[in-house]
Image (cartoon, coloured by chain):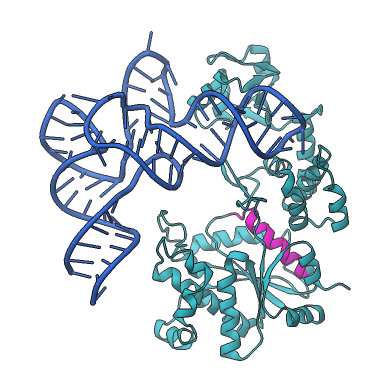
Chain colours: A cyan, B blue
Amino acid sequence: MTNILDTLKARGFVKQTVFEDELYKKLGSESVTFYIGFDPTADSLHVGHFLQLVAMSWLQKAGHKPIILIGGGTGMVGDPSGRSDMRMVMTPEMVQHNCDCFKTQMSKFLSFEGENAAVMINNADWLLNLNYIDFLREIGVHFSVNRMLSAECFKQRYEKGLSFFEFNYMLMQAYDFLVLNRKFGCTLECGGDDQWSNILAGADLIRRKEGREAYAMTFALLTTSDGKKMGKTQRGAVWLDPTKTTPYEFYQYWRNIDDCDVANCLKLLTYVELDEIEKLCMYNDERINLAKERLAYEVTKMVHSEADADAAVNQSRGAFGDGEELPEKTIDKGITRVVDILVAIGVSPSKGDARRLIEGGGIRINDTKINDVNAAISEPDLSNGFIIHKGKKIHFKVSVK
RNA sequence: GGGAAGAUUCCCGAGUGGCUAAAGGGAGCAGACUGUAAAUCUGCCAGCUUCGCUUUCGGUGGUUCGAAUCCACCUCUUCCCA
């Protein structure tokens, strides 16, 4: 049986580790309890979280026990990294609501039952009632400011400024790891590579304070080949919640990624075997599209369902090939002008935008280009339904309610 | 506590009384070319009842025929000194 660390490395997950040799042996010989932290700042996860969850599921499948730590404690204060944003104070109810949403979505990738069931824990349980003096005496003494300042994550913040709260973040996260180690025997913390300093601090703290082994491992962040964060679109993040990002849109997002990112995404986001990925991605011409289709299908199936993935494929055939199905939208009775319809179905954010789109020749109805800004849909089309195209990629079948 | 600078449209960043819905860049959208890719070139990029009107340049008042631009106060941010 192969060591899970080999698998993760081969697929490009692993960025940094501590005591890799020891960790390797441990992962190969026993069930390791590990954790990753998630901040409950929204009621849905996005694709960045998805990568972490896939990594977790690999580990769980190999027999290790996942702990999902929800940052309810830090969420009560608000994430300081969103600089200009209002620091929205989250009520316990909101945090609870977001946790519930997370759990539903996560249960598709992780098992909350069985021998090594995943568990979800909220750090508000211990962070909120922390006594400041006790914390300083117990935890604070183990941290050297000089060392913290030399950490990469703080260096980048020098110019922008760094609040004491943010500086404390490292201690809180380190403390989380310590608590999980004491209460649940958690010995490994994972996370995105941007969390390296914080994770390392926790592992260090446990070793120093408890004299016990503790390990750290960071995973690659989901970025494009030129280093930009993936998962952003015109309309914001790509969410896992089907009401925020429909399965069709989700499918299309992956179908449209750059050539050079396909292999990476297949390795990190799907369970497709490595040699198969290699075969799929060996082309530099249009045959690479098969790899994109496979990626989009697999990921949609994982996040939503096989039925949703099949539907998305069929709708895509209709939109881009010669299939029958198309994603559908309905409009209220009485809306007839093209401009109004574009706004009604959410293709344009405003009428001005819709007008410009028509003026620029970007809109077609039933394969006829619309040139007149005031054009309206004719009666037979209104009752029978019609197809609206925006550019080359957005196609909807529209019918009147 | 003392001193200095600053807050501009999604982001970065010009603008210092009318010609400014506000330069330039990035992102985004559309057109051409393609493979539902990239690169490149072109156009668009506050809202609306669109030959016009309305709302925008941290907040509130004020000066002016007229302010993003001048004055006052407030809020917040950054920097220097303690």
Q: Is residue A110 visible?
A: no
Instruction: Give the residue drawn at x 58%, y 82%.
Output: A204
Instruction: Give the residue drawn at x 81%, y 26%.
Output: A322
**Would residue A46 be counted in the magenta stretch?**
yes
User: What main secondary structure does the magenta stretch of the protein show?
Assistant: helix
Compared to residue A318, the image places residue A127 above or below, namely below
Instruction: Give the residue drawn at x 52%, y 75%.
Output: A125
Q: Quadrant of residue A26?
A: bottom right
Left or right side of A28 for B61:
left
Compared to residue A257, the image places residue B3 above or below, namely below
Question: As rendered, which of A94 and B3 lies closer to the eye?
Answer: B3
Residue B3: x %, y % from top left: 18, 61
Question: As rendered, which of A69 and B29 lies closer to the eye?
Answer: B29
Residue A178: x %, y % from top left: 58, 82
Left or right side of A59 for A355:
left
Residue range highlighted in magenta: A44-60
Q: Is residue A400 visible?
A: yes
Which residue is outermost to the bottom?
A211
Q: Quadrant of residue A220?
A: bottom right
Q: Quadrant of the N terminus of chain A?
A: bottom right
